[in-house]
Amino acid sequence: MRRSEFAMPEGIYLDGNSLGVMPHAAHKRVQERLEQWRTQVALGWEDWFGLAEALSPSIARLVGAEPHEVIATGSITANLHALLSTLYRPDGERRVIVATALDFPTDLYALAAWAERGGGTLRLVPSRDGHTLHPEDLTAALQGDVALALFPTVLYRSGQRLDVAGLTQTAHAAGALIGWDAAHSIGATPHDFHADGADFAVWCHYKYVNAGPGAPGGLYLHERWHGLTPGLPGWWGNDKGSQFEMTPGYRKAGGAGAYQMGTPSILALAALEGALSVFDTLELHEVRARSLALTDHLIALADRHLPEMKLVTPRPHAERGGHVSLSHPDARALSASLRNLGVVPDYREPDILRLAPVALYTTEAELEEVVRLLRDLLGSGDHLRVDLTESKVT
Ligand SMILES: Cc1ncc(COP(=O)(O)O)c(C=O)c1O
């Protein structure tokens, strides 16, 4: 779709749901911001001071929000803590926080800490099959004494996509707030957080948005909550007009910008600035259509040629994010063998091979080649001879 706009690495890259490929625009923008630092030093702040806010219109498009409801800052973990410190207000019996047994661990660490601090408990929606969540279990968990829920838009291991609009409605009908971890959907699927009424959301920009390792994260806070004072305030979340008056009293910025804490990394924001410029010229429904065409193709190839591998990603389009997960007892060895053959997939404990065809740069021919290599490995057993002692990450 936009492959020529990316610095494609050698071989076949199917790990864009972990770290996206570098857009040339990100490289260029970082170089320009570096040059500004070299030549202007502190005078560069004239331009850098409102840089995060300047990116909000592009980010708001990606998550379906108003620009003042989003900000690029922190990380998923830090933003979650900042939002929970503000929004988790246990009251009487209503103290439970709901999440799921299949969540990315950092979310659970943050939620458990706030539940403990607030005298509440963390209730986890169980999985019936170890890979996916059943709609009835999600709905049931939201009933009763729930103060706040956090769900993933797309599950990081299986790639199951949840119904944001429906679950938001269910949570609100039960009197609970609801937020979303959109790490595995931003840049791959459209969102409509504001229209769906979601209270808050967090995500990263290093996966499908391609803003680089450790890129600034993102947060959304529905404008109905903009009257609250952030629980973890900092001077960068002060109203921009009075930030440099340096008064002892905190005067929070009007919107989600209030959730910034300290001085942002301008070089990291520059990479995000470049990465977002690619999305500015794209229609998100076209990105989603291309992503679905690629995952359909991959699933059809796996059905035909890899019967020993079990598809754990749901088949219906509405229930699927941007990646395809196949389980196999040798998944770790298969992942390592593919790497030796010039393919970058990723592996998630204990038996999942995750393959992420990215709408912006993956081709059908690459998927066909990867399935052919997997077929050869499974047929020959060559993957069982690979050295698994080296890689710590995947
Ligand atoms: C669903 C999800 N949440 C959270 C994180 C990590 O968050 P952070 O940006 O704080 O490292 C990841 C990282 O891959 C993730 O996949």
Image (tube, grey):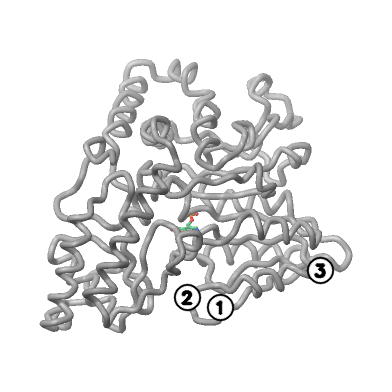
Q: Nearer the viewer, mark 1 or mark 3?
A: 1
Q: CB under 8 Å between callouts 1 and 3? A: no
Which element carries disc 1, helix, strand or loop? loop
Which element carries disc 3, helix, strand or loop? loop
Image quarter hosting the C terminus: bottom left
For label 1, count other residues whose C-alpha is less than 10 Å away and answer few (under 14), some (14-19) or many (20+).
Answer: some
Q: Which mark is residue 127?
A: 1
Residue 352 point in image, percent of width and height: 35, 74
How many angstroms separate mark 1 from mark 3 (CA)?
A: 21 Å
Q: Which mark is residue 145?
A: 3
Tell me: residue 229, above or below residue 378. Answer: above
Residue drawn at (68%, 61%) of the image: 149
Q: Amino acid at mark 2?
A: His
Tell me: residue 7, above or below residue 155. Answer: above
Image quarter hosting the N terminus: top left
Q: Which mark is residue 131?
A: 2
